[in-house]
Image: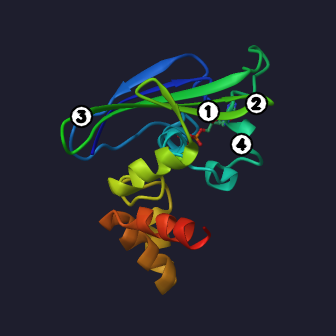
Amino acid sequence: MLIKRLKLSGFKSFVEPAELRIEPGLTGVVGPNGCGKSNLLEAIRWVMGENSPKSMRSGGMEDVIFAGTETRPQRDFAEVVLHAEDDFGEELEVMRRIERGAGSAYRVNGSDVRAKDVSLTFADAATGAHSPALVSQGKIAQVIAAKPAERRQMLEEAAGIAGLHVRRRDAESK
Ligand code: ATP
Ligand code: MG
């Protein structure tokens, strides 16, 4: 799967609508401290279904919504749209939106879907929120220091089989 475009609005420091084109190959994000590099990577993880506020460096999920500054009021919602192309050349538009007091909603190509559908789509394509395709600050050290079970999880994400565990747990609980 290829990530082609990312649109953010009201997400963390990206208060005004912003759009980024992501070219094929390796993409690096550079800039001064505090300019929003980590926030960008978090936006990609978030739209892919990340549900741990901790991995968004947030206390609660609503903390991803622009919190306001001395000169700008806070926003009521955050929205991230990711355009991708799957391995069959099909275009995929995934949208996640969170509103204060209303939780998250997801759409894929314009239709409402569940969080799980989105997570599984990316996990199956080996580009999920925990995929090694997204290398954030401290990640390399984390790989080196990881316990064998954690390292196995990373390899499974890379191999695109992480979604199978989710489906097995589902089947076993039925
Ligand atoms: P570094 O080089 O230090 O790693 P960075 O480029 O990764 O910096 P980020 O951590 O992505 O920077 O961005 C930090 C900025 O985002 C801070 O100024 C912080 O106040 C702002 N920020 C984070 N969450 C929110 C929010 N909910 N509302 C407004 N601003 C936010
Ligand atoms: Mg950072």
User: Tag 3 or tag 1, which sits nearer the N-term?
Assistant: 3
Label 4 secondary element: helix
Residue 102 disc label: 2
Residue 61 disc label: 4
Indicate the amino acid at tag 3. Glu
Label 1 secondary element: strand
User: Tag 2 or tag 3, which sits nearer the N-term?
Assistant: 3
Q: Residue visible at 36% across and 52% down?
A: 127
Q: Determine whether label 3 and label 2 are within 8 Å by CB.
A: no
Q: Determine whether label 1 and label 2 are within 8 Å by CB.
A: yes
The nearer-to-camera label among 4 and 1 is 1
Quarter of the view holding residue 109:
top left
In the picture, the quarter occupied by the C terminus is: bottom right
Q: Residue visible at 62% across and 70% down?
A: 173
* Local crowd size for mark 1, using a 10 Å CA cut-off: few (<14), some (14–19), many (≥20): some
In the picture, the quarter occupied by the N terminus is: top left
- Taking 28 as reference, is 105 left or right? right
Instruction: Single out the residue that lies furthest toward the left.
Output: 88
Q: Is mark 1 within 8 Å of ligand 1?
A: no
Q: Is residue 162 above or below residue 134?
A: below
Residue 23 appears at what percent x and percent y? 24, 34
* Local crowd size for mark 3, using a 10 Å CA cut-off: few (<14), some (14–19), many (≥20): few
Residue 90 disc label: 3
Q: Nearer the viewer, residue 152 or 103?
A: 103
Residue 105 disc label: 1
- Label 1 and label 2: CA atoms lie apart by 9 Å
- Label 4 and label 1: CA atoms lie apart by 13 Å
Q: Is residue 34 above or below residue 78?
A: below
Q: Determine whether label 4 and label 1 are within 8 Å by CB.
A: no
- Label 4 and label 2: CA atoms lie apart by 11 Å
Indicate the amino acid at tag 4. Met
